[in-house]
């Protein structure tokens, strides 16, 4: 596998270390001649189909069929983020199959930005949701009085604006060029080589490390609180969010690891980095369809859901968390009310 066959708008390690077309002396194999690449194309097509239609259903149900609550606001925003990402996957699939970028400079920049917009918006929303759950458990009376759809919407808008800002470097450094009579979409840091490391590290810290720490702290507090109140059975509504968080980090960790390794690509085997970045990128894309799957199969008992229709299963799974949290808040409110004469 050569340097030109496994960049499909996810990673850095494509043509960043090549500054002159004359450096290319051997023709490259096409993606369809490589077994790993063909398998990843098939996987990406499956991810597109599941993610596009799955997130479309979540958007339809949580946005139009259910009462607007704080929980449905979180889920709707996550589904929109994943749906947007999946909508652009066919462009990347075409790039993989043809081994050539035919969509122009704007789409080269835009599709890469959408990928990072999905990454940042998803993790920021997961952080917000984790904090929301933690506050609901630690301060149930305050949460019941102040946890509103309007405030949740403001937080969602803030998360999206921050994600857009952190995705902007792709619009700056993504370019197209011609090598061996082949047009490619790649990252060009030749004008500012230090930006490669700065961008990679900032994406890792802002989009992975710091959010991970916050989420771990929030869920640790929740577990300790539930255990201290002997209400561990009430942890059921957190299973959905825990599964979503676990899926996000499992999907994104390999990508970040290989992106950081690629910063010193001369120290590592090229084939390992090539395969690692391809697989890591596919795992990252898989996160976009796992969310709606988890909504369906993690919320209620599987057998009961299997007997109901698909739409009914998704609506029950999405709504269950809010109902169970509300019951827990109501019980906690009663306890706190007896302990205090003024709220």
Image (cartoon, helix red, strand yellow):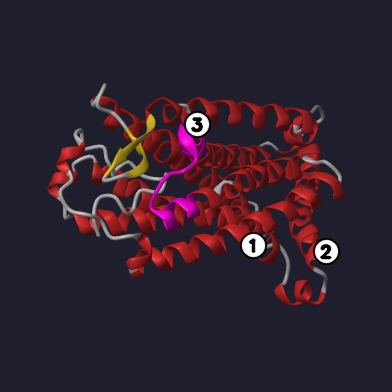
Q: Could you tell me if residue 105 is visible in this image?
A: yes
Density class for disc 2 (Cα within 10 Å; few <14, some 14-19, many ≥20) is some
| Residue 106: numbered disc | 3
Residue range of the region highlighted in magenta in the rendering: 92-112
- Which percent across, then down, holds residue 242? 57, 54
Tell me which numbered mark, 1 or 2, is placed earlier along the sequence: 1
Residue visible at 39% across and 35% down? 203
* Secondary structure category for the residue under label 3: helix
- Screen quadrant of the C terminus: top right
- Screen quadrant of the N terminus: bottom left
Q: Are marks 1 and 3 in contact (CB under 8 Å)?
A: no
- Which percent across, then down, holds residue 47? 55, 60
Q: Which residue is mark 1?
A: 293
Alpha carbon separation for disc pair 1 and 3: 33 Å
Please give left or right for residue 10 compared with residue 111 in the image. left
Q: Which residue is mark 2?
A: 312
Tell me which numbered mark, 1 or 3, is placed earlier along the sequence: 3
Name of the residue lying farthest toward the top: 191
């Amino acid at each position: 596998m050569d340097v030109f066959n496994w960049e499909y708008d996810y990673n850095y390690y494509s043509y960043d270390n090549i500054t002159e077309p004359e450096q290319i002396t051997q023709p490259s194999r096409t993606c369809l001649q490589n077994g790993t690449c063909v398998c990843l194309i098939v996987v990406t097509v499956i991810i597109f189909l599941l993610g596009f239609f799955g997130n479309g259903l979540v958007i339809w149900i949580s946005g139009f069929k259910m009462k607007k609550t704080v929980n449905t606001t979180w889920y709707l925003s996550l589904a929109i983020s994943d749906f947007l990402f999946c909508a652009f996957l066919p462009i990347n699939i075409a790039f993989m199959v043809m081994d050539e970028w035919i969509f122009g400079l704007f789409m080269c920049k835009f599709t890469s930005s959408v990928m990072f917009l999905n990454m940042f918006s998803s993790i920021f929303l997961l952080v917000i949701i984790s904090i929301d759950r933690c506050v609901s458990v630690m301060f149930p009376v305050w949460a019941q009085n102040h946890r509103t759809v309007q405030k949740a919407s403001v937080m969602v808008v803030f998360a999206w604006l921050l994600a857009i800002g952190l995705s902007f470097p792709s619009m700056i450094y993504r370019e197209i060029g011609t090598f061996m009579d082949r047009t490619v979409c790649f990252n060009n840091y030749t004008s500012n080589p230090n930006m490669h490391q700065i961008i990679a590290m900032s994406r890792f810290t802002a989009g992975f490390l710091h959010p991970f720490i916050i989420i771990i702290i929030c869920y640790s507090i929740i577990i300790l609180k539930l255990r201290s109140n002997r209400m561990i059975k009430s942890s059921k509504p957190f299973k959905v969010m825990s599964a979503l968080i676990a899926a996000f980090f499992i999907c994104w960790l390999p990508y970040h690891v290989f992106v950081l390794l690629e910063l010193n690509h001369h120290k590592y085997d090229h084939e390992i980095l090539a395969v690692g970045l391809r697989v890591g990128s596919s795992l990252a894309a898989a996160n976009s369809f796992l969310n709606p799957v988890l909504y369906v199969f993690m919320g209620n008992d599987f057998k009961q859901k299997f007997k109901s229709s698909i739409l009914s299963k998704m609506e029950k799974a999405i709504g269950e968390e809010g109902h169970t949290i509300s019951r827990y808040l109501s019980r906690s409110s009663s306890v706190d009310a007896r302990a205090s004469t003024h709220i």
